[in-house]
Amino acid sequence: MEEHLPFFVYGTLKRGEVRERCWPHPASDIVAATTRGALYALASYPALLPGDDAVSGELWFIRASHMAETLRVLDAIEGFRQGDDIDLYVRDIADCVSTDGAKYRAYLYYYVQPVEPSQRIAPNDQNVCLWTASQNARGRKSI
């Protein structure tokens, strides 16, 4: 049985992004937060790898009765454990901090395919890495 934890999302599953409507159940709460990692901008979606940058995202809190279905749906969206030998992302648990300083453990998906250094998203003026579809379409500042 999986732990009942929030989900940290940093890309297309955030509010206002293309896959926001893919959540099988509404969140009971959504909180702005950061985690540590290295963020990359791929063609039309981001990739998070382990790293030391602060990465901006949202914590989605899902009711316990909806966790199993939510995990199944998000695993399919992220290409995790879909019956083939190659995962696009893997689900893990990471430490996150909300904007008010509260600490959480949350599910998130790390990208496990190769990335190019030129795709890395550099921290912004607030020293946080952030991905949005509109920013990605306009181009981004990489390291």
Image (spheres, rainbow, N blue to C red):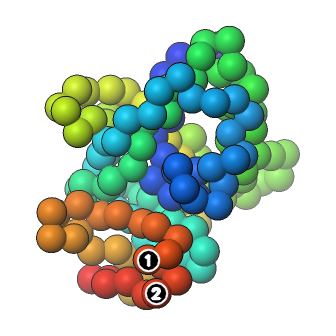
Residue depicted at x 27% and y 74%: 122
Q: Quadrant of residue 17?
A: bottom right
Q: Amino acid at mark 1?
A: Gln
28 shown above or below 97 = above
- Classify mark 2: helix, strand or loop: helix
- Specify the quadrant that holds the C terminus: bottom left
Residue 80's spot in the image, x, y percent?
Answer: 69, 47
Asked whether the beta carbons under mark 2 and mark 1 sit within 8 Å of each other, the answer is yes
- Residue 6: x %, y % from top left: 48, 27
Task: State which quadrant residue 45 falls in.
Answer: bottom right
SS at circle 1 = helix
- Neighbor class of circle 1 (other Cα within 10 Å; few <14, some 14-19, many 20+) is few
| 69 lies left or right of 133 | right
| Above or below, comparing residue 60 to residue 131 in the picture | above
Q: Residue furthest front?
A: 16
* Number of numbered discs: 2
Q: Of the numbered discs in the image, which one, if any, rests on residue 119?
A: none
Seen in the picture, residue 36 relative to 38 is either above or below; the reply is: above
Is residue 116 shown to the viewer in this render? no
Q: Residue at x 31, y 42 (%)?
A: 33
Alpha carbons under labels 2 and 1: distance apart: 5 Å
Is 22 in front, or is 78?
22
Q: Residue at 57% across / 41% down in the picture?
A: 91
- Is 83 on the left or on the right of 69, as rendered? right
Q: List x then y, in percent, for residue 90.
A: 59, 47
- Give the number of the disc on residue 135: 1
- Asked whether, in this view, residue 136 is left or right of residue 50, the answer is right
For the N terminus, the image quarter is: top right
Name the residue: 38% across, 35% down. 31
Determine whether 108 is above or below 39 in the image. above
Q: Residue furthest right?
A: 83
Mark 2 — residue? Answer: 138
